[in-house]
Image (cartoon, coloured by chain):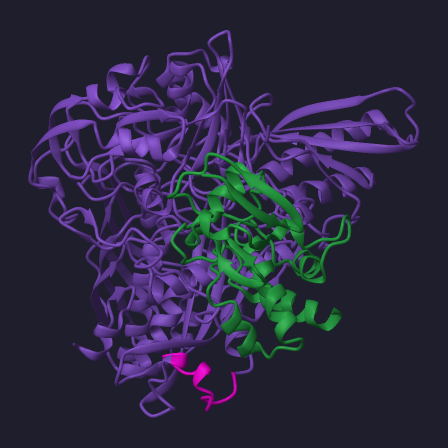
Chain colours: A purple, B green
Amino acid sequence: MTLTPAELTSAVSGGIGTSPQRPDGNLKVRGEFAYASDLWHEDMIWGATLRSPHPYARITSVDITEALKVPGVYAVLTADDVPGRNLYGLEHKDQPVLAVDVVRYQGEPIALVGADHPETALRAMKKIVVTYEVLEPVVDMETAVDDTPLHPGGNLVRHVPIRRGSQDVTAEVVVTGRYEVGMQDQAFLGPESGLAVPASDGSVDLYIATQWLHVDRDQIAAALGLPQEQVRLTLSGVGGAFGGREDLSMQVHACLLALHTGKPVKMVYNREESFYGHVHRHPAVLYYEHGADHTGKLVYVRTRMYLDGGAYASSTPAVVANAATLGVGPYEVDNVTVDAYGVYTNNPPCGAMRGFGAVQAGFAYESQMDKLAEALGMSPVDVRVRNAMTEGSVMPTGQVVDSAAPVAQLLKLVQDKPLPAGTSSDIRELPGGVSNTTHGEGVVRRVGYAVGIKNICFSEGYDDYSTARVRVSMVNGSLSAAVHTAACEVGQGLVTIMQQIVRTELGIERVTVLPMDTTIGNGGSTSASRQTYVTGGAVKAACALVRDKLAGRTDIGDEVIDETTEWRHRATEAIDPVTGQGNAHVQYGFAAHRAVVDVDVDLGLVRVVALDCAQDVGKALNPQAVVGQIQGGSAQGLGLAVMEEIQTSGGKVRNPSFTDYLIPTVLDMPPMSIDVLELADPHAPYGIRGVGEPPTISSTPAIVAAIRAATGLALTRVPVRPEHLTGT
Amino acid sequence: MRVNVTVNGEQRQADDVWEGESLLFMLRERLGLPGSKNACEQGECGSCTVYLDNVPVCACLVAAGQAQDRSVRTVEGLAEGDQLDPVQEAFVEAGAVQCGFCTPGLVVQAHDLLDRVPNPSDPEIREALAGNLCRCTGYEKILDAVRLAASRR
């Protein structure tokens, strides 16, 4: 029986500020780390999901008779078999566990099969007969609000307005633009997977790859009609997340099948199903107008932006708030007008992905800053430095930035980095690579800059906390500690950080990380770059309680010190629904990029030659992991800049595979030199500032700026494709 | 059908294998070796890379029956007891492992590269690893790991 990652004990020493090896590292390189798709149980059966082929249709009948007759099939379930609330969702409970009467996106789950082999389940699924009345899908985010209502309250999920300063001030220099951001996928490598094990008392254990155990549990329990204590979750190995595991995928489905059949049920999506099985980054259309005086000082920014939430709300309300409140970027602007709209359509549901609202706005406002620089005859760096926010600056929400905001410094750091050597004569280092499309002719090299801002932790008054338990006892004559939370390790290295914090706080070298599960209180979501901040803060606080009881002893005999505590960051406020004013965010993170890009202007092929980044992280608790986050985030930004998009046509996904949805390979990624600033935030544990998201914001516009400079084209849409450069 | 195959030096047998099953499925679900990963199951990501008669292949693209009477070496077969292979050791040390889902495939692919080319240049490393997707690291620390492993072998 393989159920969950073992307790992680690492003999490697190292407190905060050092880079000890990950406690799960050896298991991972040996192939022995138990990911959710590796789980196995005696007598387990396999679950499969029948999904809608239509983006919008009325279901007129579902007939499971023939499917049930397939030998090896244990159960075929539809919406009628959902015993509890057949609706879930992170912010609005608007998404059915299994469709009732209507499907609102291609890939929406309609029925489940449990069978003795995955192939049996697939064959049975094909025998389920669903009849549809196909409806005209709503696919245009800009007109969706006035189109066919897809939900009882209409198609507007949320409108966030911001009004600051004068709304009709004029300026000497004005630049306007319309920008588009395509639908990006998290493309985590470990597919959605889990194993549900029913218990004889009608309760269920779910071993699962997720980003937030407790919110999963609450939604599952409601759908199953069970009290929360009868749904127990344990985190399995998670193969990346990036926001795509914040929403439920197969969690309720596997539990339903397990409770119906009385057998353990494993569900593993394949890659195509994964594209249908999780939310994506909101595509966006953004209109901007920037006004500045002749010195380049911004006078006003006005923007109207649309974010396509697709068929269900997911985290659209928070994404819209981020896009709005961070919509002018890391710049001082006295007069701001923002209207951000998140809407329902029949496109794939969109929700959380690294950067979450700030990425879409970032591409647009940084494109505008370049346009402004050109209009003023200034350099792109100078116009940004001229307007750069600093500590004490006021956000469009009226919130005063009350810790370091080294925007100008970050830009100067990347500007001062050495440039790579000139265009190579090795075809492997030219656009097109070994396709042998050029030996340097037609290749133009240019540089682009960008800087971005991201809120860290949950915002708008959310009670954002984490729970940590630290237990200390004697093992082989020495003090030994165990740390227990429900905060999800998804690859970022929280397990290492927690060990480091315990070593620093208690001076105990041997620290075991217990499996993450719902037997302890909420750890909050692994998102918003918040786990080191919030769960790190909780572990630190629990250590302080333990330290009081230890009272300096190094031998506590048979005593066990076991302390659990909740820790919260300082409170935030809701923003005013009319003016958008309020202290919405806990902390801001900043990163700047310089991209050096070779463009084969004849063929439209792009090769990013260097992608250097400077970021303030407050305090690098684990410098190696910090750099790893910045490089990984930069890579996802490169993907959005030049290749990554879920392409839809009439609401249908055209490229649900790694053959057609491209993510950067090692051939696409350039060397990345990273400068890490450590300007402590006095409000945060150890002064840290969330790391994961800021680099994903500035990477994309820096690359596109370089391509624009090389081609002279306006390039208002990402990803930039070869045909956008050649006009073919 | 029944498949007889040598896996990591041991003679193994799998029964009731469906003809459409991949070598990857047989390894993971029938032989208790889930180290080779199932990220795309269509030959695009390299996470299931194993040696088949000493040649790296995507196990998802090989039918289980094709492994009959052949020799397979998976990521689980690289370490000698507690002693990690230098490539494995370097991946952990260099910070090349985050979520780790790509790691088994990359470790096998890098192991093969260093067997063939003991001191590869950066373009050679990139070319050798071009079929292995990683979503977490941006590849910089994976390159560091391969360079480190090369320096130690």
Q: Relative to A435, does residue A562 appear above or below in the rendering?
A: above
Q: Residue at x 35, y 51 (%)?
A: A185
Q: Relative to A219, does residue A336 appear above or below in the rendering?
A: below
Q: Residue at x 49, y 26 (%)?
A: A214
Residue A353 on the magenta span: no
Residue A312 in percent (x, y) is at 25, 35
Q: Is residue A469 visible?
A: yes
| Along the line of sight, the residue nearer the viewer: A123 or A113 | A123
Q: Is residue A93 visible?
A: no
Q: Residue at x 58, y 38 (%)?
A: B32
Which quadrant is home to the C terminus of chain A? bottom left
Q: How many marks?
A: 0
Q: Report the magenta residues as a range.
A: A420-434
| Along the line of sight, the residue nearer the viewer: A34 or A252 | A34
Magenta stretch, main secondary structure, is loop
Residue A555 placement: quadrant: top right
Q: Residue at x 32, y 81 (%)?
A: A709
Q: Relative to A43, does residue A172 appear above or below in the rendering?
A: below
Residue A654 in percent (x, y) is at 22, 53
Residue A437 left/right relative to A28: left
Residue A345 left/right relative to A520: left
| Along the line of sight, the residue nearer the viewer: A81 or B70 | B70
Q: Relative to A352, does residue A84 appear above or below in the rendering?
A: above
Check the image and name the residue furthest to the top: A201
Residue A357 in percent (x, y) is at 35, 49
Residue A637 in percent (x, y) is at 41, 61
Residue A726 left/right relative to A439: left
